[in-house]
Amino acid sequence: MKEFKTYHPIVNLAYFVLVIGFSCVLMHPLCLTTSLVCGFAYSAVLKGKKTVKTNILFMLPMLIVMAAVNPAFNHEGVTIIAYLTNGNPLTLESILYGLAAAAMIAAVICWFSCFNEIMTSDKLIYLFGRIIPSLSQVLSMTLRFVPRFSAQLKTVANAQRCVGRDVSNGSIIQRARHGLAILSIMTTWALENAVDTADSMKARGFGLSGRTAFSIFKFDKRDMKALLCILILGVYVLAGKIFGGMYFRYFPSVRGAGFSIFGLSLFAAYLALCLCPIIIEVWEAAKWKALKSKI
């Protein structure tokens, strides 16, 4: 289920810019919870059930560690729970802020994992190729290089393991030597790959004036509707942020914006914005089932 991936790159980019941006600046607990849950759910939709276990094993320890570490360095807040051995106070506000910061980082990581799945290198080149061609090329090559490097590293590690030269074999010194050998192999592979890529780009005329690029992306009515919906929701949430409808602070005391219909509408709009890709997936799946039933 990757229907949102079939939309125009402008729609994809606009969505992720808004969602990731809001995830970084909206520190209200409801906003953080919404962003984290929706990002986690969409990541599971894109990558399957395996990513659920991976995300949980990664995020839960991070939430616990940040909630525990932040009070050790941040002693602001008026609600003192206890005093540490060094005499510094342990405050409720510092604990809540640590949880909020951890939730924000986890949500951003989830959304970036979805971004990497949806925004392929050809989409980045299409969006930024004419404006900043060098940067778009670097971004696309980086996104392409990381998974290739990981796959090659697994291949080399498995080959070294077969001959008893893996980092898990031998004494500490031998393991270090085996690790350095694998690092040397990967460095050589990366340099050779860079030379081959440069020669290939030169042979294809990269950087020459008047060079054109083929694109398969077309902006149609479906993309227009999705983009308008995303922008309207994004602008409404941004307006709510500016006018204090989603205000929340942790220091010196915990305090947020009061209850209002406007505030509820803002949280509903933010929830709808975060759920846009999942709604599209469900809608397209329902349409496909309806069409199949008519056959």
Image: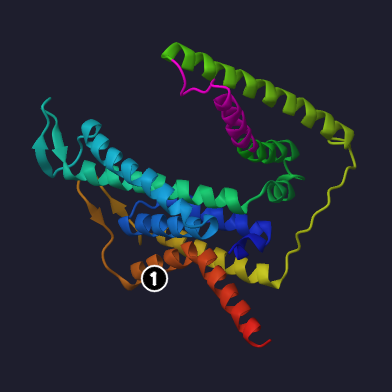
Comparing 152 with 163, the one in front is 163
**Placement of 180 over or under 3, stated as above or below:** above
Give the magenta part as a residue range: 148-170
Going 35% across and 57% down the picture, which residue do you hit? 33
Percent from the top left, x then y, of residue 164? 54, 21
Confirm whether residue 24 shows in the render: no
Q: What element carries label 1?
A: helix
Going 70% across and 51% down the picture, which residue do you hit? 123
Task: Kindly indicate the quadrant of the structure image that contains residue 194.
Answer: top right
Q: Which amino acid does label 1 sit on?
A: Ser
Percent from the top left, x then y, of residue 114? 54, 52
Confirm whether residue 95 shows in the render: yes
**Placement of 249 over or under 288, stated as above or below:** above
Percent from the top left, x then y, of residue 221? 70, 72
Marks counted in the figure total: 1
Residue behind mark 1: 265
Going 65% across and 83% down the picture, which residue do you hit? 291
Most common SS among magenta residues: helix
Percent from the top left, x then y, of residue 273? 49, 64
Where does the C terminus fall, quadrant-wise? bottom right
Where does the N terminus fall, quadrant-wise? bottom right
Q: Is residue 117 left or right of residue 255?
A: right
Q: Which colour scheme is used?
A: rainbow
Q: Residue furthest front?
A: 163
